[in-house]
């Protein structure tokens, strides 16, 4: 470890001490943002010399976050990286400091207090039994029931986006899986080297984030690091593509395009019949 890294850790430890003090005050909210923490930090002359404003502090934290150092010193934070220019930082109370379950957010009430959730980047827990053929599966109207969100959106917003519903902020968070899609994905991933191949709207950055979150939520480990977002599906090498539309390169895909929703493949049962039982997938 070089001097620069050692100094960075010293700064992080100083920040952590201020954060701990703040979080031990019962009047502090369970979660605070960077600006609020910075209001307290800037009273430390050494910190305010080094990091004279919240933007500099955000830049410093970003570097430490990307190096993986920050989590080691300050485990009780999360970061929203969806705005590239300015990451959003949130610091939350460590569970040992929580006096009562009621102080936790409602969805945490049933969780064991000693539990810590860690996502380690290099630990895939689902083994794919691939025989070497590669299968791509589209999201919208193949894995994801796009229309299932419409009832859950403010009707005025819905009609204002009549022609571009995928631009409605947050709309992907509201979508259910298509019938049998999850079980089918899991079954296919045992036979094929399976990836999700989807396009996210260029003008709705929140959709890019929502798509990976949807995959985390509905598929989890079985789709670990298997999401590809692109406007050029034709550039991918593979044997099969299950997609409902010809758009974004699907029709130029050089393997076999299985058109989901067509008369030949109207639903997941018909796709499974072909890919698992029928003639497909034999080397
Ligand atoms: Mg689609």
Image: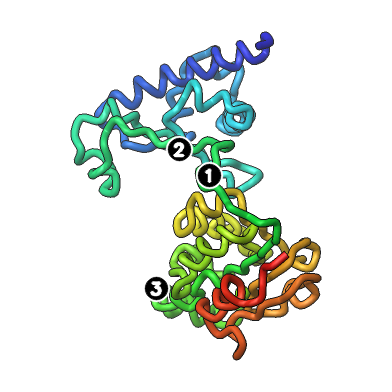
Q: Are marks 2 and 1 in contact (CB under 8 Å)?
A: yes
Disc on res. 156: none
User: In the visual, does 109 lie left or right of 115?
Assistant: left
Question: Which residue position is annotated with label 1?
Answer: 80
> Real-space Cα distance between discs 2 and 1?
8 Å
Q: Residues within 10 Å of mark 3 (few under 14, many from 20)?
A: few
**Which sits earlier in the primary sequence, circle 3 or circle 2?**
2
- Quarter of the picture holding the C terminus: bottom right
* Label 2 CB sits under 8 Å from any ligand 1 atom: no
- Marks 3 and 2 sit apart, C-alpha to C-alpha, by 28 Å
Image region (quadrant) for ligand 1? bottom right
- Residue 42 visible? The answer is no
- Residue appearing at x 52%, y 76% in the figure: 268
Q: Which residue is mark 3?
A: 152
Comparing 218 with 267, the one in front is 267
Pinpoint residue 107: horizontal percent, then vertical percent: 29, 49
Secondary-structure class at tag 2: strand
Callout 3: SS: helix
């Amino acid at each position: 470890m070089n001097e620069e890294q050692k100094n960075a850790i010293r700064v992080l430890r100083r920040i952590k001490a201020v954060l701990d003090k703040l979080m031990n005050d019962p009047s502090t909210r369970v979660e605070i943002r960077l600006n609020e923490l910075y209001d307290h930090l800037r009273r430390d002359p050494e910190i305010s010399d080094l990091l004279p404003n919240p933007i500099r502090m955000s830049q410093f934290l970003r570097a430490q976050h990307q190096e993986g150092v920050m989590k080691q010193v300050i485990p009780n934070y999360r970061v929203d990286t969806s705005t590239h220019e300015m990451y959003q930082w949130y610091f939350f109370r460590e569970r040992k400091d929580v006096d009562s379950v009621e102080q936790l957010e409602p969805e945490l009430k049933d969780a064991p207090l000693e539990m810590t959730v860690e996502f380690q980047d290099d630990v895939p827990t689902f083994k794919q039994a691939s025989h070497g053929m590669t299968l791509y599966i589209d999201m919208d109207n193949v894995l994801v029931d796009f229309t299932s969100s419409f009832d859950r959106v403010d009707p005025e917003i819905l009609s204002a986006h009549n022609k571009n519903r995928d631009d409605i902020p947050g709309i992907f968070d509201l979508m259910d899986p298509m019938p049998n899609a999850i079980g089918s994905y899991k079954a296919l991933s045992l036979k094929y080297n399976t990836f999700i191949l989807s396009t996210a709207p260029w003008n709705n950055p929140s959709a890019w984030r929502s798509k990976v979150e949807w995959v985390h939520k509905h598929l989890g480990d079985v789709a670990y690091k298997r999401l590809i977002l692109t406007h050029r599906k034709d550039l991918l090498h593979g044997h099969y593509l299950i997609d409902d539309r010809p758009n974004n390169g699907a029709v130029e895909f050089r393997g076999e395009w299985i058109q989901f929703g067509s008369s030949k493949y109207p639903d997941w049962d018909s796709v499974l019949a072909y890919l698992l039982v029928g003639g497909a997938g034999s080397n």
